[in-house]
Image (cartoon, helix red, strand yellow):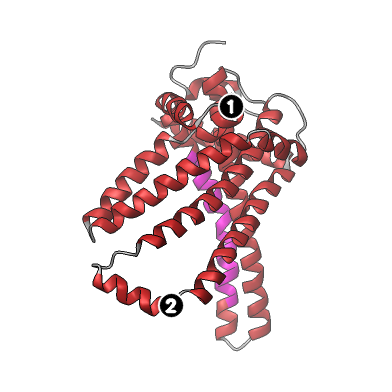
Amino acid sequence: MFERISNGFALARSTWGVLIKDKHLLVFPVVSGFLFLLVVISFAIPMATLIDWNAVGQQMKQNNNRPPVWMYAISFLFYFCTYFVIIFCNSALISCALLRFNGETPRVSDGFKMALARLPQIFAWALVSATVGVLLKVIENAHEKAGYFIAAIIGTAWSIMTFFVVPVLVVEKVGPVDAVKRSVALIRKTWGEALVGKLGLGFILFLLAIPVILLFVAGIYLVASGMTVPGVALIVAGAIALLLHMAISAALHTILLAALYQYAADDRVPEGFDRDVMEGAFAQAPSK
């Protein structure tokens, strides 16, 4: 157990080392966040200005707090757009990470080109993800209490089953059904490594979050003490640091996902990762 935890932290350190070497990989989560914000705005403005929410509220009261059917259609479109943006950018980042693992020097343009080459697979997976998202909402709204827990259980199981779907789409160029089957096969082999690796990353990200939290605390304290200008400046600095922390977190988790996929699928140690750590982490790893 302690050896697996140690391997998890070693995997996290190696993942951090890859990001330090290729800092431009942060471009992908930044672009993803920006596009996600555009999607939210493009849906929020029309819904806020064109829909009579008082009438919707009255209709929901008459229907046991269930939303009207047309809201599920809008939810599907919103889920599809957001999933497409996220999956596309994650595919680009995974492509660059795999290039680095194989000794190449990836450029941002390389990642986007490889993601564009997988547009049919990305489009299909975004459709599947949006459909599952809406179905979970339907289950959640079917019963006030039980629906929430059932949807949470199904959603968690779905997240685990589809853990490796994006790298499978990028590398193996298969459809959604085959991607899920392949992901399930890989997660059976790597669930322990994925867990300890994510825990290791979580610890590193927690340490990075401490100064961000301190900036907010110091800023709020100064504002409360009457020193508004320096307080607001610290809060703004904290907000910028928080956005950077979110980008780093997304990049690290995606790089770790790519590393786990390459070793599990091809039995090859990614460049930048320690051979002994990778072979020790995977109980079924072949001897080299």
Q: Quadrant of the N terminus?
A: top left
**Dominant secondary-structure state across the stretch colored magenta:** helix
Q: Is residue 8 above or below residue 89?
A: above
The quarter of the picture where residue 112 lies is: top right
Sooner in the amino-acid sequence: mark 2 or mark 1: 2
What residue is shown at x 41% (from left), y 28% (from top)? 184
Image x and y of residue 82, in percent: 54, 52
- Whether residue 115 appears in magenta in the rendering, the answer is no
Instruction: Magenta stretch: give its range.
Output: 198-219
- Report which residue position mark 1 lands on: 173
Q: Residues within 10 Å of mark 2 (few under 14, many from 20)?
A: few
- Report which residue position mark 2 lands on: 52
Q: Amino acid at mark 2?
A: Asp
Which label number is shown at residue 210?
none
Q: Nearer the viewer, residue 239 or 34?
A: 34
Q: Nearer the viewer, residue 224 or 182?
A: 182
Q: Nearer the viewer, residue 95 or 172?
A: 172
What residue is shown at x 43% (from left), y 36% (from top)? 195
